[in-house]
Image (cartoon, rainbow, N blue to C red):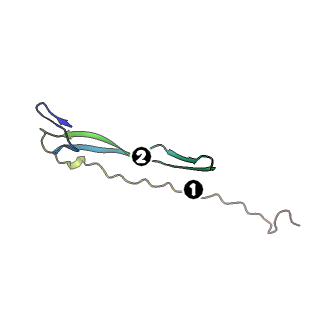
């Protein structure tokens, strides 16, 4: 739904000529959702889960009925999101070597 001092428009399913200017704030994953299925008296249980990916947006401007056309973005263009790099794994510390070639406890 868009409105101004002189006119109101209800969109079904959208308002023609309306635009929203938004900037992506962050991408993140929601808390884990647990799915537990049980069939009673059959000793049958299954548990799975997933984490939904979400995006936070910041609405900068809503342009609609009596507003001018969208201004060019120019330098205000949002930067592309770079995927995170996994941190390098630390190597395992070296194990101490025994001096003798024989197995311990054997004579």
Closer-to-camera residue (70/87): 70
Query: Which residue appears at 20% of the width and 49% of the height?
Result: 74
Closer-to-camera residue (74/97): 74
- Give the SS element for disc 1: loop
> Which of the numbered marks, if any, corresponds to residue 90?
1
Examine the rendered structure and indicate whether residue 57 appears above or below residue 95.
Answer: above
Examine the rendered structure and indicate whether residue 102 appears above or below residue 4.
Answer: below
Rendered location of residue 9, percent (x, y): 16, 37
Query: Which residue appears at 25% of the width and 39% of the height?
Result: 60
Q: Decide: marks 1, 2 in contact (CB < 8 A)? A: no
User: What residue did someone put label 2 on?
Assistant: 28
Closer-to-camera residue (83/21): 21
Image quarter where the N terminus lies is top left
Q: Residue furthest bottom?
A: 101
> Which of the numbered marks, if any, corresponds to residue 98?
none
Query: Which residue appears at 23% of the width and 48% of the height?
Result: 75
Q: CA distance from mark 1 to mark 2?
A: 26 Å
Rendered location of residue 34, percent (x, y): 52, 45
Crowd band around label 1 with a 10 angstrom C-alpha radius: few (<14), some (14–19), many (20+): few
């Amino acid at each position: 739904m868009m409105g101004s001092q002189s006119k109101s428009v209800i969109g079904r399913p959208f308002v023609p000529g309306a635009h929203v200017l938004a900037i992506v704030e962050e991408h993140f994953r929601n808390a884990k959702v647990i799915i537990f299925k049980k069939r009673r008296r059959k000793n049958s249980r299954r548990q799975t889960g997933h984490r939904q990916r979400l995006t936070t947006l910041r609405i900068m401007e809503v342009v609609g009925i009596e507003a001018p056309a969208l201004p060019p973005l120019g330098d205000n263009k949002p930067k592309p999101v770079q995927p995170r790099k996994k941190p390098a794994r630390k190597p395992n510390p070296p194990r101490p070597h025994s001096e003798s070639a024989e197995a311990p406890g054997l004579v």
